[in-house]
Amino acid sequence: MSPRVIQKCHNMSKPSATPVTELKRHATEIIADLARNPGAVMVTEHGRSAAVLMDLATYESLVRRVEVLEGISRGERAFVEGRVVTHEQASQRLERWLRHDDRA
């Protein structure tokens, strides 16, 4: 496979581009490479960014990070609005949240 078919992104903020026609021709190879070497591939269509293909572990990690950041943001808003709890109450909520997360 030519080097330009899989132009993996090791920097998630700037994935390199792979034309959709190359993805169609080499999908199995690209997916296998992503499984061996986690990262992302930017898919272009007509020279424009159209989608990002990434391995499952990278995707799940990204989703988890977003969830954590959203929780922090909600906590900051709650603090500004005066909706606060004691340390003990917060610890209990966190413990329940973590237990629930382990079951998912």
Image: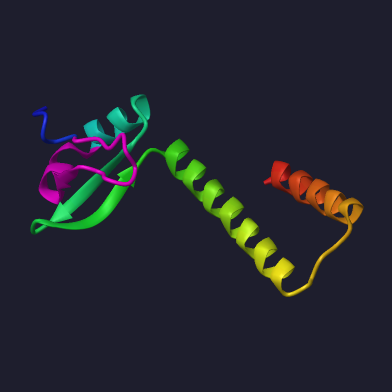
- Image quadrant where one finds the N terminus: top left
> Where residue 34 sits: x, y (%)?
32, 32
Q: Looking at this rendering, what residue extends furthest in the bottom direction?
A: 81
Residue at left offset 28%, top offset 28%: 33
> Where residue 8 sits: x, y (%)?
24, 35
* Image side of residue 48 versus residue 58, left or right: left
Query: Magenta residues, as a range?
Result: 7-27
* Image side of residue 63 versus residue 5, left or right: right
> Where residue 26 sits: x, y (%)?
17, 37
Q: How is the image coloured?
A: rainbow
Determine which quarter of the picture holds residue 36: top left
Q: How many marks?
A: 0
- In magenta segment, residue 20: yes
Query: As displayed, is residue 8 above or below residue 99?
Result: above
Query: As displayed, is residue 94 above or below residue 80?
Result: above
Determine which quarter of the picture holds residue 83: bottom right
Determine which quarter of the picture holds residue 86: bottom right
Residue at left offset 21%, top offset 49%: 43
Which residue is nearer to you in this view: 6 or 77? 77
Which residue is nearer to you in this view: 87 or 26? 87
> Where residue 74 sits: x, y (%)?
65, 64
- In magenta segment, residue 90: no
